[in-house]
Image (cartoon, helix red, strand yellow):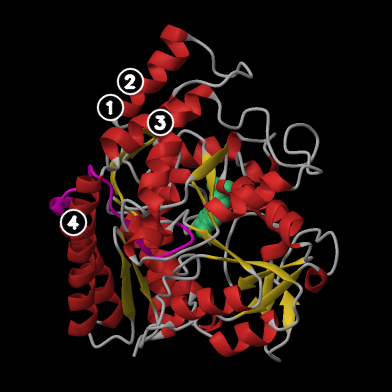
Amino acid sequence: MISTTRLQSLLARERDAFAARNPRSGAAYAAADHLFGRVPMTWMNKTAGAHPLYLDRARGAHVWDLDGHEYVDLCLGDTGAMAGHSPAPTVAAVQRRYAELGGATAMLPTEDAAWVGAELARRFGLPYWSFSLTATDANRWAIRLVRAITGRPKILVNSYCYHGSVDESLIVVGSDGEAASREGNVGAPCDVTLTSRVAEYNDLERLERELAHGDVAAVLMEPALTNIGIVLPEPGYLEGVRELTRRHGTLLINDETHTFSAGPGGATAAWGLEPDVLTIGKALAGGIPCGAYGLSEQLAAEIARHTELDLVDMGGVGGTLAGNPISVAAMRATLEEVLTDEAFEGMTALATRFADGVRGIVEQHGLPWSIQQLGARAEYRFASPAPRNGGESAAAHQPELDDYLHVYLANRGILLTPFHAMALMSPATTAADVDRHHEVFAAAVGELVA
Ligand code: PMP
C-alpha cells in the first residue's frame, strides 16, 4: 500500500531539504579531515541525511544544532540522557565534585559510592554493586565472573540482541536455524560458537536444548529486547528462563541498560525477576559515563570463596577510572533527585500518550505497523502483529522507510534515535513535545500514503 517510487521520491526530497537546512553541520562534517569516517565515533555516520547534525547545546528534553534549529529530543542519547539533558541536581553535583572539591580520579573512594550501592540494591533487589564506566564493561566483567564461578566456557544470548561490543554476544540464529556470527562482526577473536550459544527470544524450547549441553555459564539477556525494536516477553517466558537456568546450573544476567525504562528498578523490579547478576549503564549518571553490575547474595558469597581469583590487581575485572568520584556523584544526584520513583510515573504516562497517538495515526491509515511500549520508552515497527523475537524483527526492517521518517521528523524539529524508531521520555519531556511529534508523524505518513 506504500508505493516504493513514492517513498523514494519523498526520501530524496527530504534529504535535499536536510542538506539545504543544515549548512553549518554540513561544513563541520566536511572539515573533519582527521577524524576516521569524519566523526568522533564511526557509529555517528548512522544518519538518515548526508551527515550528522552537530550539537550546539541541550537542556531538558530539547537540543539545538549548529544551524540554530531547536528539536524535541526523543532520542535522549539512546538512553544516556533519559534523565533529560543536564538536569540541575546532576550539574550541581558534578560541579561541586570537579570544581569545588576537586578530584576527578584519585584512586580513592568517595562516600557517594556507598549511597549509590544502597540505592541500586533498594531498586533492583541485588545486594552488592560494583562500578564501571560503560554498560559494555559491566557486561564484560560480569561474564568473567560467571565463567570463573561456574567453570563453564559459554554465554547464551538472544538472537539480534545488543549488549555493547561484547564478543560473546555477536551471534544470531542463522537462516538454517544454526548459530552463526552476526553479519559484519569486526575481528572476532575466534569462531563465536566456541564462546557462545544463541536462542531466539520467547523460545523456551530452544533455550532448553542449548542449556542441556551443560556448558553455558550464564544467559545474558535484556528482559525485553530493545535493540531490534521492542520485543516484549510472552506470558510465562521470563519465568521459564529462570526455571531452566536454575535447573541447568546456569546463571542469569539481566542487562537493564535500556529496560531501565520499565520503572525505577527496571524490568527486574517491575516484573519481579530474580537474576544472579544485573548490569546497567548509560542513564544512571545523567549523561556522565557510568556503569554498574549487581550481584546476588549467593553469587557474591561464591565469588568470595574463590580466593584464587585476582579481583584486585591484574585479574581482568576493573578499570582505573571505574567508580570515579564524578561518576558516582552524578549517579547519586541523578538517582536521588531526577530519575525518582515519581518521575517514572510521569515518563510512563507520556510514553503511553506517545504510543496511543502513533497507534491512532497508523490505524487511521490502515498501515501494517505496530507500536510497543516499555515504561518510558515506545517504538514503532513496520510489521503487524509485533514481532515476537529478534529474527522476526530483523526481517521486518525497512531501511528506506526508517530513513524517510527520521529525516522528515528531523527537518521539522523532532529527533528519534538513529538506530531505532524509538522515543524515550525524560522527566523534562512534556505532553506538548509528544503532541508535536504526532503532528509531524501524521504529516509524514499522510504524504506517504497519499
Ligand atoms: N546493553 C544494552 C542493552 C545496550 O542497549 C547497550 C547500548 N545500546 C549497551 C549494553 C552498551 O552500552 P555502552 O555502549 O554505553 O557501553
Spot occupied by residue 275 in the image (x, y as percentages of width and height): 51, 62
Residues rendered magenta in the picture: 418-433
Q: Is residue 374 left or right of residue 328?
A: left
- Residue position marked by numbered label 1 in the rendering: 88
**Of label 1 and label 3, which has the lower sequence position?**
1
**Of label 3 and label 4, which has the lower sequence position?**
3
From this view, report whether residue 304 is shown above or below residue 215: above
Do tag 1 and tag 2 residues touch (Cβ < 8 Å)?
yes
**Mark 1 surroundings: few (<14), some (14-19) or many (≥20) residues within 10 A:** some
Q: Which mark is residue 186?
A: none
Going by the numbered disc 4, the residue's amino acid type is Arg
Do tag 1 and tag 3 residues touch (Cβ < 8 Å)?
no
Residue that protrudes farthest toward the right in the picture: 190
**Of label 3 and label 2, which has the lower sequence position?**
2
Foreground pick, 57 / 312: 312
Going by the numbered disc 1, the residue's amino acid type is Ala
- Residue position marked by numbered label 3 in the rendering: 115
The quadrant of the picture occupied by the N terminus is bottom left
Disc 4 secondary structure class: helix
Residue that protrudes farthest toward the top in the picture: 100
